[in-house]
């Protein structure tokens, strides 16, 4: 997969698996929605969640995005992760628009809640794309 194909793949609404390291050294992996902005993977989570705590504690994460329909393709990114607190309305709207469309996204975001969330920003250092 070329970098251009990878970027196009990551811009599609796909569920990914985010892996972070717990304080005890075990791995925590969960499905997440994400948004690729061309240089970073952006994941929203609740403040105080395991994802949030682990990202703060280790400062690193990996995200695996795959496609199983048609032919199997995947991209895994690994690198440092920083936490932005709090999530802006616009950031949350952009994520929900990608996955749900503009009308549904506006309804969800209008209900609030982003004030209780943080943004995990994963800066890929290493890529593992399918061939």
Image (spheres, rainbow, N blue to C red):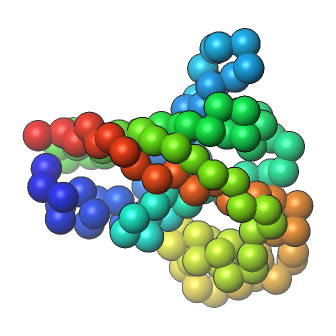
Q: Quadrant of residue 72?
A: top left
Q: Horizontal and vertical percent for residue 15?
A: 49, 49
Viewer-nearest residue: 98 or 10: 10
Name the residue at 48% across, 37% down. Answer: 62
Q: Horizontal and vertical percent for residue 7?
A: 28, 63
Q: Quadrant of residue 77?
A: top left
Name the residue at 55% across, 32% down. Answer: 19
Residue 113 vertical placement versus 109 (above, below): above
Q: Quadrant of residue 93?
A: bottom right
Q: Horizontal and vertical percent for residue 5?
A: 18, 61
90 on left or right of 34: right
Name the residue at 57% across, 56% down. Answer: 121
Q: Quadrant of the C terminus?
A: top left
Name the residue at 75% across, 68% down. Answer: 87
Viewer-nearest residue: 13 or 47: 47
Q: Horizontal and vertical percent for residue 2?
A: 12, 55
Q: Is residue 51 visible?
A: no
Residue 35 vertical placement versus 29 (above, below): below
Residue 102 vertical placement versus 122 (above, below): below
Q: Is residue 11 visible?
A: yes
């Amino acid at each position: 997969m070329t970098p251009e194909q990878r970027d196009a793949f990551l811009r599609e609404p796909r569920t990914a698996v985010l892996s972070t390291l717990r304080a005890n050294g075990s791995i925590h992996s969960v499905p997440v929605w994400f948004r690729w902005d061309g240089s970073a993977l952006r994941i929203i989570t609740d403040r105080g969640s395991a994802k949030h705590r682990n990202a703060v504690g280790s400062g690193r994460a990996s995200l695996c995005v795959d496609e199983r329909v048609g032919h199997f393709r995947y991209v895994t990114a690994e690198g440092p992760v920083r936490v932005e607190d709090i999530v802006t309305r616009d950031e949350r709207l952009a994520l929900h628009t990608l996955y749900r469309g503009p009308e549904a996204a506006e309804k969800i975001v209008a209900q609030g809640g982003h004030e209780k969330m943080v943004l995990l920003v994963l800066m890929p250092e290493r890529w593992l794309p399918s061939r």
